[in-house]
Amino acid sequence: MERVAAVRRVRLRVPQDELAALYRRIRELEDSGQQGAGVVPAEFVDELVDYWVDGYDWRVHQDRMNGYEHFGTEVGGQFVHFMHSRAGRSDAPAVLLTHVWPSGVMDVLDAAVALRKTNHLVMPSVAWGALTDPAGWGELMGRLGYGDYVVRDDRGEGPPPVGVGVMGERRGLAPDELGEVRWFNENLNAGNEEQRIRALVLSAVMLASRAQQPDRDAVLTGVMLAWFAPRLQAE
């Protein structure tokens, strides 16, 4: 019998020393003058890192995300973190609420406000299409007991209900965007710590360069959650 990966509850509480260590590595990389070269102007990188290390407040966004339960599991050999919310009645419809690219998990939380009272919500912190095999989303929903569910994204789009194992469409992801998502996920979990830090900062720079100024917090929260989620301890 094939072994089904466990779904474990995790705590989204990043210790202050781990947060400080990450900021120190980000600053060291930025001071080296190598990060972002040829992608965006150096001034943009400097400004973003200055804000990231000295102005951005992870705790505010951590508190908001902790309005939901957090879980981790493995799908097709890939770690998947997700938030879960159950509606007041057991027969409420289930929604896999994901995000397109380059939006992120904070946009998913915005979309969840209007849905959480009347729907069971499963909200992965990686974009739809990030899995090598998109049918893995059906596998995840099946593990949670949802035989039928609706896929929606943070833009309010989505196909009709699908069953477990039925492949949903990769909405909003062009081939180059899909490549970026998978590069980000693969390099963020590479064996070399320097490579992982470079992937984290380069991804933040690329995403923030496409966003409006007020969206920097959403970008930074999304990449930091992707960084910390595989390291979260079980409750």
Image (tube, rainbow, N blue to C red):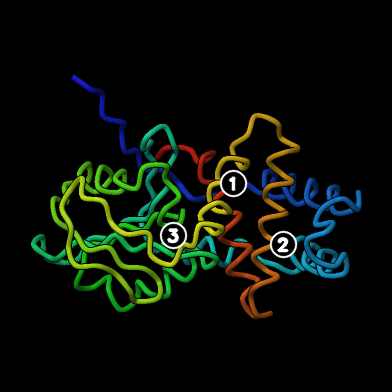
For marks 3 and 1, the one nearer the N-term is 3
Rounded to the nearest angstrom, the CA distance separating label 2 from label 3 is: 26 Å
Secondary structure under the numbered disc 2 in the rendered image: helix
Please name the residue that numbered disc 1 is placed on.
Answer: 183
Residue 37 is situated, as x and y percent measured from the top left of the image, at 84, 56
Secondary structure under the numbered disc 1 in the rendered image: helix
Secondary structure under the numbered disc 3 in the rendered image: loop
Q: Is residue 149 left or right of residue 38?
A: left
Q: In this view, does 202 lie to the left or right of 41?
A: left
Residue 175 is situated, as x and y percent measured from the top left of the image, at 51, 57
- Three-letter code, disc 3: Asn
Tell us which disc is closer to us: 2 or 3. 2
Please name the residue that numbered disc 2 is placed on.
Answer: 205
- Three-letter code, disc 1: Trp
- Three-letter code, disc 2: Val
* Residue 124, quarter of picture: bottom left
Residue 21 is situated, as x and y percent measured from the top left of the image, at 74, 44
Please name the residue that numbered disc 3 is placed on.
Answer: 66
Name the residue nearer the viewer: 92 or 234: 92
Q: Which residue lies furthest to the left in this view?
A: 91
Residue 44 is situated, as x and y percent measured from the top left of the image, at 82, 69
